[in-house]
C-alpha cells in the first residue's frame, strides 16, 4: 500500500510538473522574416550585421507566408520583426514591426542598427498585475 501511494504521489507530482515548465522562448529580440527567397543572402547579411552590433537576431529559415512567420515570432517572444521585399531592397529600406504594439516603421538600412538599438533600450511597459 505504501509503495502504491508513493507511485501515485510521484505520478501526480510528475504530471503537475509538466504544467510548470515555461514555454519555449528566444533570447533574440529580433526576427528577420524571409519574405522572398531570392533575397536570402541579404536577409542573412542583415542578420550578421545586427549580431555584429550586439543585437541578438534570428533569420527565419523558410520563405513561408508572412502570417506564419509572425505567428512563430509571437510564440517565441520576439520583440521586433524585420520585413523587406523587392521594393524595400531596391529603395534600401527595412520595415520594423513592433510585435507587441503592432506598430510598423520604415527605416533606411543605414539607420537600421541605430534605430533598433534605440527601440531595444526604450523602457518596456510595466507588467500587468494579476
Image (tube, helix red, strand yellow):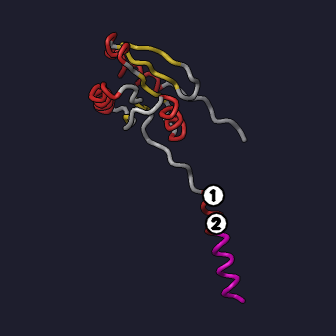
Quadrant position of the N terminus in the picture: bottom right
Q: Which quadrant of the structure image shows residue 8?
A: bottom right
The part of the chain drawn in magenta is: 1-13
Q: Position of residue 72 (x, y in %)?
A: 50, 38
Residue 15's mark?
2
Q: Measuring 42% from the left and 25% from the top, which residue is drawn there?
A: 82
115 lies above or below 30: above
In which quadrant of the rendered image does the C terminus lie?
top right
Q: Residue furthest bottom?
A: 1
- Name which residue lies at 40% across and 14% down: 107
* Residue 7, disc: none
Q: Secondary structure at mark 1?
A: helix
Q: Nearer the viewer, residue 45 or 5?
A: 45
Viewer-side residue, 13 vs 42:
42
Q: Are discs 2 and 1 less than 8 Å apart at CB? A: yes
* Mark count: 2
Task: State the residue lying farthest toward the top.
Answer: 91
The image position of residue 23, as x and y in percent, is 55, 49
Give the quadrant of residue 103: top right
Q: Callout 1 environment at 10 Å: few (<14), some (14 to 19), or many (20+)?
A: few
Residue 56: % across, % down: 38, 35
Query: In the rendered structure, does residue 7 fall within the stretch colored magenta?
Result: yes
Q: What kind of element bears circle 2?
A: helix
Residue drawn at x 44%, y 41% is: 27
Q: Is residue 103 left or right of residue 111?
A: right
Counting from the top left corner in percent of width and height, residue 90 is at 31, 12
Which disc number belongs to residue 19?
1
> In whole angstroms, how far apart are the C-alphas of marks 2 and 1?
7 Å
How packed is label 2: few (under 14 Cα within 10 Å), some, or many (20 or more)?
few
- State yes or no: residue 2 in magenta: yes
Q: Please identify the dominant SS of the magenta region.
A: helix
Going by the image, does 47 lie left or right of 69?
A: left
Amino acid at each position: 500500500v505504501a509503495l502504491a501511494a508513493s507511485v501515485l504521489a510521484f505520478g501526480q507530482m510528475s504530471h503537475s510538473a509538466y504544467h510548470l515548465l515555461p514555454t519555449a522562448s528566444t533570447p533574440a529580440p529580433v526576427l528577420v522574416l524571409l519574405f522572398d527567397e531570392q533575397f536570402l543572402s541579404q536577409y542573412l547579411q542583415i542578420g550578421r550585421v545586427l549580431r555584429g552590433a550586439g543585437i541578438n537576431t534570428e533569420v527565419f529559415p523558410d520563405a513561408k507566408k508572412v502570417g506564419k512567420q509572425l505567428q512563430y515570432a509571437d510564440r517565441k517572444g520576439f520583440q521586433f520583426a524585420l520585413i523587406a521585399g523587392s521594393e524595400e531592397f531596391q529603395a534600401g529600406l527595412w520595415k520594423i514591426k513592433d510585435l507587441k504594439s503592432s506598430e510598423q516603421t520604415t527605416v533606411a538600412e543605414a539607420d537600421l542598427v541605430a534605430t533598433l538599438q534605440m527601440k531595444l533600450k526604450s523602457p518596456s511597459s510595466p507588467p500587468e498585475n494579476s
